[in-house]
C-alpha cells in the first residue's frame, strides 16, 4: 500500500509555470500602482510583456515533452523532471536514465522557427558549428554542455548525453537529428524513438536514478 503522505512526483514545467505567474503578478501590480483607480482597466488593456510570456511558452514545451517521457517510463527508463541545479536558480528540464546511459534534456519551444546546423570556416580558418533557430542560437548548446558536465560529475563513469529537444519547430523535409559540439538536436517523437531503442551498456538504472534524484532536487 502506498504511503498517503508521500510527496507527488514533480511534473514537467512546474518551475516555468510558477515563474510566469510570479512575473505576471509583478507586472500587473506595477501597472495598477501606476494607474491608480484605472489600474484594473489598464491591466486588461496592457499586453503581456514578452519577457514574461516566454516563461509560459517554455512551460508548454516542457509539458509536451514531459508527457511523452512519462508515457515510456518503466523500470528500465527512469524519468526526472524539473530538477534544481545545486547553488543555482537554474534547473534541468528532464533527466532520463536508461541501461545505455543518462540523457540530459533541455526543451525549447520556438514555434515555426527553422532549426538547422550551420558550419562556418574550414579550409583556411577554424571550423565552427552553429545552431540556427531563426537566427544564431549556439548559446543554447553552451548551456547544455554545462548541464552535461554537472550530471557527469554526479554519476562518474556513466555515459551522459546532452539533448536539445525543440517543440513545434520547423524542420526541413526528411530532416535527421544532428549534433552541434556533441549536443544532440531533435524533436519529441524522435527523442522517444531513440530512447526506446538505445542499446544497453549495463547501467544500473535504479542506482543512477536515485543518485541523480538526490543531487538534483525537485524544483
Image (cartoon, rainbow, N blue to C red):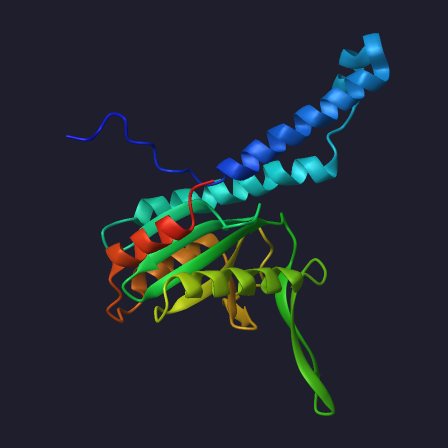
Residue 64 lies, with reference to residue 30, above or below; the image says below
92 sits left or right of 1 in the view:
right
Residue 37 lies, with reference to residue 166, above or below; the image says above
Residue 168 visible here: no
| Residue placed most toward the observer, 121 or 96 | 96
Q: Position of residue 196 (x, y in %)?
A: 31, 59
Residue 17, picture quadrant: top right
Q: Position of residue 110 (x, y in %)?
A: 62, 49
| Residue placed most toward the observer, 90 or 130 | 90
2 sits left or right of 21 in the view:
left
138 sits left or right of 60 in the view:
right
Residue 10 lies, with reference to residue 175, above or below; the image says above
Q: Position of residue 39 (x, y in %)?
A: 79, 13
Residue 215 lies, with reference to residue 154, above or below; the image says above
- Tell which residue pokes out farthest to the front in this image: 87
Residue at 76% of width from left, 12% of height from top? 40
- Tell which residue pokes out farthest to the top in this image: 37
Q: Position of residue 188 (x, y in %)?
A: 46, 53
Residue at 59% of width from left, 64% of height from top? 141
- Quadrant in which the N terminus appears: top left
| Residue placed most toward the observer, 47 or 146 | 146
Residue 19, picture quadrant: top right
Residue at 28% of width from left, 31% of height from top? 6
Residue 44 visible here: yes
- Tell which residue pokes out farthest to the bottom in this image: 124
What is the number of callouts on the image?
A: 0
Residue at 75% of width from left, 18% of height from top? 44
209 sits left or right of 52 in the view:
left
- Tell which residue pokes out farthest to the left in this image: 1
| Residue placed most toward the observer, 74 or 169 | 74
Amino acid at each position: 500500500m502506498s504511503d498517503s503522505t508521500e510527496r507527488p512526483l514533480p511534473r514537467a514545467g512546474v518551475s516555468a509555470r510558477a515563474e510566469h505567474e510570479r512575473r505576471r503578478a509583478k507586472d500587473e501590480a506595477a501597472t495598477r500602482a501606476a494607474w491608480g483607480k484605472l489600474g484594473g482597466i489598464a491591466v486588461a488593456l496592457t499586453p503581456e510583456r514578452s519577457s514574461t510570456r516566454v516563461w509560459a511558452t517554455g512551460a508548454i514545451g516542457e509539458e509536451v515533452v514531459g508527457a511523452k517521457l512519462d508515457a515510456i517510463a518503466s523500470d528500465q527508463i527512469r524519468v526526472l523532471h524539473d530538477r534544481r541545479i545545486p547553488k543555482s536558480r537554474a534547473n534541468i528540464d528532464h533527466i532520463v536514465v536508461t541501461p545505455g546511459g543518462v540523457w540530459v534534456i533541455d526543451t525549447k519551444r520556438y514555434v515555426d522557427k527553422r532549426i538547422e546546423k550551420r558550419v562556418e570556416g574550414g579550409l583556411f580558418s577554424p571550423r565552427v558549428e552553429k545552431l540556427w533557430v531563426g537566427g544564431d542560437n549556439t548559446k543554447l548548446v553552451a548551456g547544455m554542455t554545462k548541464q552535461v558536465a554537472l550530471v557527469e560529475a554526479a554519476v562518474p563513469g556513466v555515459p551522459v548525453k546532452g539533448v536539445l529537444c525543440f517543440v513545434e519547430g520547423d524542420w526541413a523535409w526528411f530532416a535527421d537529428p544532428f549534433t552541434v559540439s556533441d549536443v544532440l538536436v531533435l524533436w519529441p517523437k524522435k527523442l522517444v524513438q531513440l530512447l526506446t531503442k538505445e542499446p544497453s551498456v549495463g547501467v544500473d538504472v535504479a542506482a543512477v536514478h536515485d543518485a541523480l534524484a538526490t543531487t538534483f532536487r525537485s524544483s
